Every structure is written in C-alpha cells, then in structure tokens.
Image: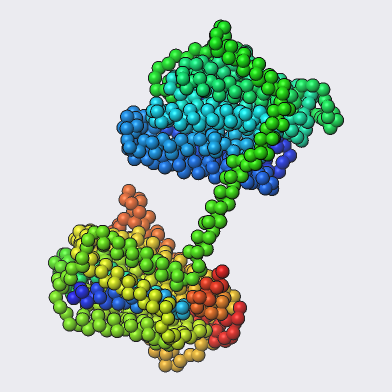
C-alpha cells in the first residue's frame, strides 16, 4: 500500500514540477499548489500509515490504541495545509500584480522586464 | 600588556580628543567625527582587555570599521574614499584570516580563553594544524600592522584628519597587530617558523619603509612610512629568540607611541595653520608656535635616539639585542643601522626643519598663534619622552617588566638605565647619529634619487592592489550576471536539479537501495484513490483552459483529503476540504483580467528539459517516501506526546493538543506567517483604484434568503468546532475556516454590508486573534514557567459540546480561530474588490 502512495506522491510532484517550469505564470501557480499537495502527503505518509484509527483518544479510553497514526505529523501537515493556502493566495495576488505592471503573465517576459 | 595598551589608548586618546576639538573647530561634521573616534577608542579598549579570543576578534573588526569611517572623514574627496576602502579591505581581509586562525585554535585547544590555551601550549604547538593557525594569525597581524607587502594602506590612510593619523595610525590601532603577536607569543611562539617569518617580515618592512620614508616630502606620508618601519621593528623584535628582545620591543612600543603621536599632531597643526604639508615650503615656525615647536623638537630628538631622551634607551636596547644574536643578528644589525639612520633623517625633517631658520615664505608672515588644544598634546608627549628618559627605572621599569614576563612567560628583571658606559652599543649609536646627519645634509640628492627610482619602477603596492580589486569585481559581476538571468524557470531548474543531485549523491554514498515495504494491508479503495490522483495530476498538466485546471486542482485536493480521511486524520481531511473550497473560490475570483493560458505548443527542447527535471523530482519524492518507511525516528516523540495528552493536557484530540499546547510556539509562528501573507496581499492589491466596495455585485434572491439562515448557523457551528476541538476533530484552524465561510456567505447575500465577523473587520480579527494568542502565553510567567506553558483551571459543561476545560490553551485556540478567520476574510475581500474594480473598468487593471 505504501508503495502505491509513494508512487502517487512522485507523480503529483512530477506534475507539479512540470507545471512550475512552464512559461505561463498561471501554470506556475498551479504547479506550486500541486507540489504543496505532494509535500503534504509525503510528510503525512512518511510518519507511517496507521490502521485506520484516528489520532483521537476514544471516549472511554485513556490512551491512543496500539498502532495509531502519528499525531505529530498530522499537526505539522495541518498547519502546512493552511500555510500553503496563505502562500498560494499571496502568489496569486503577486501574479495579478505582475500582470498589471507588465501586461503579461509570462516567465520570459518577466525576465525581460527585469534586465 | 593589555593594561599598557589600555593606558596608551586612554592616555593618548585624551590628548587626541582635545587636539581634535581644536583641529576640527568649526567643521559641521565634528559630532560625527567624535562619535567615530569614541567608537574606535571603545573598541580598542575592548581589544586590549579581552581574554576571550572571539571577543577580541569582534573588537578587532570594530577597530577596522571605525578606522574606515575615520579615514573616509573627508568623504567628498575621491582619494579619501579610495584610501579608506583600501584600508578596510586589507585589514578586514586579514581579519578573516585571523578569525580562521582563532577558530582553529578553539578546535585544537578546546577553548577560546587565552589563559587556558597558553596552559595547553604543547598541545597546540605539536598539532598538525599549528602552521596553519600561526599563518592565519600572522596574516591578521601583519595586515593590521601594515607589514610589507601590505604596508601601503597606511600611507594611504593619511587622507584622514591629523588626529586620526596620530591616534589610530601610529599610536594605537596599527599596534593591534603587534599586540596580537605579543599576546600569542606564549602560546604560539618559540618555534623556528615563528622566528623566521616574524624576523623576515619585520626586517624587510623596517628597512624598506625607512628608506622610502627618507625620500618623502609630505609631512604625513613621511611619518606614515616611518611608522611602518617602526612596526616592522616591533615585529622583528617579537620574532627574536631572546628575552631581551621582548624587553626592547615593549619599551620601543611605548616610546614610539609617544614620539610618533606627538609628531603626527605637530604635522596636523602645521598643515592646519599653513595649509601645506610640503616640507620644502615650511620654515621658521618656531616664533609663531613656540610651545608646539618645543614638543616637536623633543619628540624628534627622542625619535633620533639622542640622550637624554627615552628614544635613546630604546635604541641602545635594540642594538644590544641584535649583538646578542649572531649570526642572524649581524644582518639585522645592518638593517637596524640603516633604519635608524633613516629615522634620524625623518625626525629632523619633521621636528626641526619646519621650525628652524628664518621665514622664507611671505605667506606665513601673518600667522596667528593657535589655542591650547593645538600644542598641549604634542608638548606633553614630547616632554614625557624627556622625563621618561631621565628617570627610566622609576616610571617605565615596572610596567615593562610585567609585560615582558607576560609575553615571554618567564621571570625577568628589567633594569632601564640611560647611561650604560662606553661600549660597542654606544659606538653604534654614534655611527647612527652621524650617518643620519650626513644623510640629512644630502637630503635633496636623496629625494632626487628616490624620484628617479619611483619613475623607473612605475608601480606601487596601491596600484597593484586596486587593479586586482577591480579585476575581482569584474569577475564577480560576470559570474553574477551569468547565474542571475532573471528567469524563474532557470532558477527553478537549478534549484530542483541541485536538490535532487544532493539527495541522489547522499543515497549513492550511503549505498541505499529502496526496499518495498509491505507492512500496511492492501486496501482496494486506496489503490483506486491513488490511481485517480495520478490521473488527475496528469490531466491538470494537460489542461489548456484555466477553469479546467483550477477545477482539476480542486479535485486533487479533495482526493488528498479523502486519503487523509482513510488513514485516520479527520482533522486534516476537514481542513483540506475547507481550504480546497476556499482556494477554488479565490482562483475563480482571481482569473478575471488574467490572460488565458496559451495553447500547448509542440514539444521543443525546453519542454523536454522540463520533463526531465520533473521526472527527476518525482523519482526523488517517491524514493524519499520509501526511505522514510525504513527510518522511523519520530515514533518516540509522538508516543510520548500521545501518552501525556490526556493526563497532562486534558485533551483527547492529540493533534489539537500538540497544536495549542505542546508545540504552541510553532503554531504561533505559523499564524503569524498567515497574517503576514494576508497583509502582503492587502498591500499589493488594497491600493487606489480598487476600493470600489461590493455595491455593484448583483444579488441573488435565493442566495440571500438561504444565507440569512445558514450563515448564522455556520458561525455558531464554527464556535462549536472550536470548543470541542480539544477532544474531538475540530479546533481553531477548522473553526476559523468555517467562520470565515459563514461571514463570506453573509456578505454574498448582502453585498452592501461590509465583510464582518462578530462585528469585526478582517484586519481587526487578525490583530485581536494574534493578541489572544500572544497574551495567552504570559500567565505562565507568574508561575515561574516558560512562556506558553499551559495553565488549567476549572471546567465548563456546555450543551452539545460537553465538558470544556478552561485554560490558556483554550485562549490560544480562540486566537488561532480569529486569526484564521481574519486572514481568509482579508484574502477574499481583497480579491473581490479587485474583481469588482475590473468589472467596472476592465482596462484599468491592465493599462497602468
């Protein structure tokens, strides 16, 4: 099962990278989002996949059951999701701003503007 | 040793400050100048009394910087700026070497305390790194103390105002290198390497600089070269083998500080009064400046080494030392004779020539005597030279003895006498003075010879250094332009390839071969989900319309959420779904006014390259995941956290407990990042022209009617999520997202009303939320605990929610809730305003 998820992560990352390296800044943005997804799943998976239980202690129990998922990784990924949302929004606005300044949304055009 | 330097720094510093006040009277930059001067004095004092080598290094660099600022005082002059830069680059470059030496010393000796290092000197000296350490420290010292071939910055530094030259570039800062060598002498000294390099550098510098000094005609340059020569003498003495040499060095250091400081101030005073530093034009100033003249003559006589001045004692010692160390001593003796004879010429040129004789130049007829500030410094220093010379044992004996003992690390009694009787040393002194006088007599011929040589050689250290520097800058510029093309694609490609190469290299070296873990049981739904996500990813890449790609991206996000849900992370799944929804919303708002994506172009080299990089990165991610299954390092921490979650933090939802209690400081950093991102968005889009407000949005009656009832429910639900988050899936992040959605819904239904949650705008929400989070950590201080330690007290039973524990983590979570809600609302509001503005005037967003 881990193998399938690992391959899936690789595919998502490859798709994200492919998009990041394109000329259209909009695609670059989509690529960033894809890469962020891949990274989140990577951290989540790397901590070990549980057996379907949650990282919440049951009503009657005192501790998590044996083989529970890693709560620390979940906490990390949770903040990562929210932060990548913030960063994505920031980049989106950066894209719009760039477009307004240069009347173009193209990586190459941007390089020309700078130099 | 340190104390002596400290006395020199403060003592001469006092005189220099008085003098500088007179020198720069009326200048509008005097405050600035004095500030730098005191900065330097402080740094130098620190250097003198530092015991820790790292601290010493910091003060060392501070002196370099303040020296730079002081040399560049007349910053409107190009030469002034250039000289300052030369001095800074050379001394700071030496400083880097010195730091490397210090760090190696620390590694070898296990400490940076000089005293402790000296106790472990065998360890250091027998270590394989010893030559490297010594050379690094040596480079630091010889650049600072202007030894050949780095000497040229010191004459250049004469662009500084005279007080600076007197203080930094003769009496104190340039002595720092000598000081450094002296204090590391017990640690690194007494090896063949030490003796030969120091004596070599010292002797060459001493002789060469003295010869150059002799043919100078500019008062300050002349003094500068003679200072370089004196520094060479000091280095040479410290490199010698016998203790007498150290005694001579210590004495000479003091003596030199006295007479050279005085002479520099004299030079400055003359320049200020007459407007020139050319010796040939200066005559008969004694009548106008009698007291200055007395100081100058006294200092000059001390420098020439005539009895009864203290310079005489120092010179006698110099000769005595060299006589004791044949056969090298003989070579050094000849060098010393030349240098001292040259010194006599220099002393006479500076101290006597300008003052003696009749006034030849008409311009100087109506010179007015100057105030006390001008002559008090030189006079005191000059007279001091005389007093010390008359009563050497009384005043100088003890301090010199103490210094010698420290530097040489053995007991040694110092007897200083003015008169040693008739012996070889006295004869040498006589020869020196006579030859000096002869040379002085033929000074014009000497000058012509010097000029001839200078024209013939046609190069100088400064020119070589500056040419090298310019070349270096050109090279750096070329490299930077090569790497920094300004194209994101190129940057990203480089970053990805380097990252993957590093990963691959590490694997290659560790001999890792990926294993294929089969621990988890096979689950058909996960297989389907995996294939679905892969397909969605590929489709996203192939999409040619913006809306399609946004939609596909959203699908990927929901797929990932499903994966989280399948593997026991309800919090993550909920958060992911909410965030994906909001992302879709933002993208949908944002694509207004953006150009459409270009149609897919035919495969070209560029796209093949990108494909290659993408495959590399994908493979890297896959291998990284597989590798992570083999190493399970994190388990221990997570288990601990899970075990104490309920008994200590009263929470059953371990993820939430980690976020608001165990690792609350991390969370605080993260919500701060969110706020910054939102502010960035606001700053970029919230400017003029898009403050249109939402009034033009058409209102949907159905949405309005439903939102009236659903939106308040959502907000209530969000509070419920927040409160129960400690025990069940939920918490501040999720609650905040839901609350923001509720607020946005209200706004969509009633576009005329501003976007509000609990009557607060997005900005206010963020501020209040951050304040909640920050303040929630403070109560812990009153119980002597670290910041953000959880405090609990009491509980509350609410309908539907159940028992809610009251405590600082709850306050913290409320802060998170408010911040997240505020950030999302801020992002939405900014995007929406932009979109409205675009609709009203589509051209305004593209034309400006």
Residue found 50% across the figure and 67% down from its top: B485
Residue found 33% across the figure and 64% down from its top: B501
Please state which of residues B708 and B106 is positioned toward the viewer in this rendering.
B106
Task: Please provide percent x and percent y for residue B222.
Answer: 66, 31
Task: Please provide percent x and percent y for residue B710.
Answer: 37, 85
Please state which of residues B598 and B243 is positioned toward the viewer in this rendering.
B243
Task: Please provide percent x and percent y for residue B473.
Answer: 55, 54
Please state which of residues B571 and B274 is positioned toward the viewer in this rendering.
B274
Residue found 20% across the figure and 73% down from its top: A2
- Left or right: where does residue B52 sit relative to residue B233? left
Task: Please provide percent x and percent y for residue A9.
Answer: 28, 74
Q: Is residue B32 above or below residue B370?
A: below
Q: Quadrant of residue B757?
A: bottom left
Looking at the rendered image, the quarter that the C terminus of chain B falls into is bottom right
**Number of callouts in the render?**
0
Render colour scheme: rainbow
- Left or right: where does residue B486 sit relative to residue B843? left
Residue found 53% across the figure and 20% down from its top: B333
- Left or right: where does residue B743 sit relative to residue B26? left
Residue B509 shows up from this direction = yes
Q: Quadrant of residue B169?
A: top right
Please state which of residues B537 and B498 is positioned toward the viewer in this rendering.
B498
Residue B112 shows up from this direction = no
Q: Is residue B660 above or below residue B448?
A: below
Residue furthest to the front in view is B456
């Amino acid at each position: 099962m881990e193998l399938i998820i690992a391959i899936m992560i690789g595919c998502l990352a490859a798709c994200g990278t492919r998009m990041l390296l394109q000329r259209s800044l909009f695609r670059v943005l989509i690529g960033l989002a894809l890469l962020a997804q891949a990274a989140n799943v990577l951290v989540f998976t790397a901590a070990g996949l549980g057996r379907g239980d949650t990282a919440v202690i049951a009503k009657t129990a005192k501790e998590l059951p044996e083989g529970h998922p890693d709560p620390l990784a979940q906490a990390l990924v949770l903040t990562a999701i929210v932060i990548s949302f913030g960063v994505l929004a920031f980049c989106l606005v950066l894209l719009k701003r760039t477009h307004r300044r240069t009347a173009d949304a193209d990586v190459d055009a941007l390089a020309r503007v700078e130099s | 040793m340190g104390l002596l330097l400290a006395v020199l720094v403060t003592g001469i510093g006092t005189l220099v400050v008085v003098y500088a006040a007179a020198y720069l009277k009326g200048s509008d930059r005097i405050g600035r100048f004095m500030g730098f001067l005191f900065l330097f004095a402080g740094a130098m004092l620190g250097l003198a009394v530092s015991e820790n080598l790292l601290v010493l290094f910091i003060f060392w660099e501070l002196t370099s910087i303040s020296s730079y600022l002081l040399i560049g005082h007349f910053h409107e002059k190009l030469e002034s700026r250039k000289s300052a830069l030369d001095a800074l680059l050379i001394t700071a470059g030496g400083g880097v070497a010195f730091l490397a030496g210090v760090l190696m010393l620390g590694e070898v000796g296990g400490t940076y305390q000089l005293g402790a290092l000296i106790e472990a000197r065998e360890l250091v000296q027998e270590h394989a790194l010893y030559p490297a350490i010594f050379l690094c420290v040596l480079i630091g010292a010889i650049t600072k103390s202007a030894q050949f071939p780095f000497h040229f910055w010191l004459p250049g530094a004469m662009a500084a105002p005279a007080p600076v030259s007197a203080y930094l570039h003769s009496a104190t800062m340039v002595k720092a290198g000598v000081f450094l060598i002296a204090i590391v002498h017990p640690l690194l000294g007494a090896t063949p390497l030490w003796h030969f390099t120091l004596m070599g550098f010292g002797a060459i510098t001493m002789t060469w600089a003295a010869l150059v000094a002799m043919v100078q005609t500019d008062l300050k340059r002349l003094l500068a070269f003679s200072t370089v020569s004196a520094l060479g003498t000091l280095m040479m003495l410290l490199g010698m083998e016998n203790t007498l040499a150290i005694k001579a060095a210590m004495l000479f250091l003091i003596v030199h500080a006295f007479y050279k400081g005085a002479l520099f101030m004299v030079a400055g005073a003359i320049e200020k009064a007459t407007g020139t530093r050319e010796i040939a034009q200066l005559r008969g100033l004694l009548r106008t400046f009698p007291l200055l003249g007395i100081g100058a003559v006294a200092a000059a006589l001390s420098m020439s080494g005539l009895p009864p001045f203290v310079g005489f004692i120092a010179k006698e010692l110099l000769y005595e030392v060299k006589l004791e160390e044949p056969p090298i001593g003989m070579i050094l003796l000849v060098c010393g004779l030349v240098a001292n004879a040259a010194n006599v010429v220099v002393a006479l040129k500076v101290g006597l020539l300008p003052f003696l004789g009749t006034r030849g130049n008409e311009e100087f007829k109506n010179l007015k005597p100057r105030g006390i500030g001008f002559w008090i410094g030189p006079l005191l220093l000059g007279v001091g030279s005389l007093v010390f010379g008359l009563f050497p044992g009384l005043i100088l004996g003890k301090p010199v003895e103490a210094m010698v003992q420290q530097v040489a690390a053995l007991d040694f009694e110092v007897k200083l006498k003015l008169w040693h009787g008739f012996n070889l040393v006295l004869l040498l002194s006589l020869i020196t003075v006579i030859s000096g006088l002869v040379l002085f007599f033929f000074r014009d011929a000497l000058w012509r010879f010097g000029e001839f040589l200078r024209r013939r050689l046609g190069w100088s250290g400064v020119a070589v250094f500056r040419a090298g520097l310019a070349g270096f800058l050109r090279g750096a510029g070329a490299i930077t332009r090569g790497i920094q093309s300004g194209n994101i694609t190129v940057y990203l490609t480089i970053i990805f390839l380097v990252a993957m190469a590093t990963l691959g290299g590490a694997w290659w070296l560790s001999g890792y071969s990926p294993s294929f873990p089969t621990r988890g049981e096979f689950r058909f739904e996960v297989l389907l989900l995996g294939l679905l996500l892969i397909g969605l990813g590929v489709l996203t890449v192939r999409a040619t319309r913006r809306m399609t790609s946004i939609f596909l991206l959203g699908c990927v996000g929901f797929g990932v959420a499903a994966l989280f849900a399948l593997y026991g992370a309800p919090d993550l799944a909920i958060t992911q779904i909410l965030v994906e929804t909001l992302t879709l919303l933002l993208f949908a708002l944002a694509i207004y006014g953006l150009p459409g994506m270009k149609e897919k172009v035919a495969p070209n080299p560029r796209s093949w390259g990108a494909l290659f990089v993408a495959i590399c990165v994908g493979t890297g991610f896959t291998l990284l995941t597989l590798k992570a299954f083999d190493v399970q390092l994190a388990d221990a921490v997570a288990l601990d956290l899970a075990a104490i979650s309920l008994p200590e933090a009263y929470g059953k939802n371990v993820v939430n407990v980690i976020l608001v209690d165990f690792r609350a400081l991390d969370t605080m950093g993260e919500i701060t990042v969110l706020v910054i991102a939102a502010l960035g968005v606001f700053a970029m889009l919230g400017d003029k022209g898009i403050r249109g407000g939402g009034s033009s949005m058409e209102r949907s009656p159905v949405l309005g009617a439903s939102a009236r009832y659903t939106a308040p429910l959502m907000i209530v639900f969000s509070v419920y999520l927040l409160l129960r988050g400690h025990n069940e899936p939920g918490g501040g992040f999720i609650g905040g997202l839901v609350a923001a959605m509720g607020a946005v819904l209200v706004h969509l239904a009633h576009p005329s009303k501003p976007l509000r949650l609990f009557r607060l705008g997005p900005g206010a929400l963020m501020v209040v939320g951050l304040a909640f989070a920050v303040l929630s950590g403070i109560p812990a201080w009153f119980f002597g605990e670290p910041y953000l330690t959880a405090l609990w007290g009491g509980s509350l039973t609410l309908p539907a929610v159940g028992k809610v524990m009251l405590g600082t983590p709850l306050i913290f979570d409320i802060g998170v809730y408010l911040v997240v809600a505020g950030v999302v609302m801020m992002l939405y509001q900014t995007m929406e305003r932009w979109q409205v503005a675009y609709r009203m005037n589509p051209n305004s967003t593209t034309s400006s």
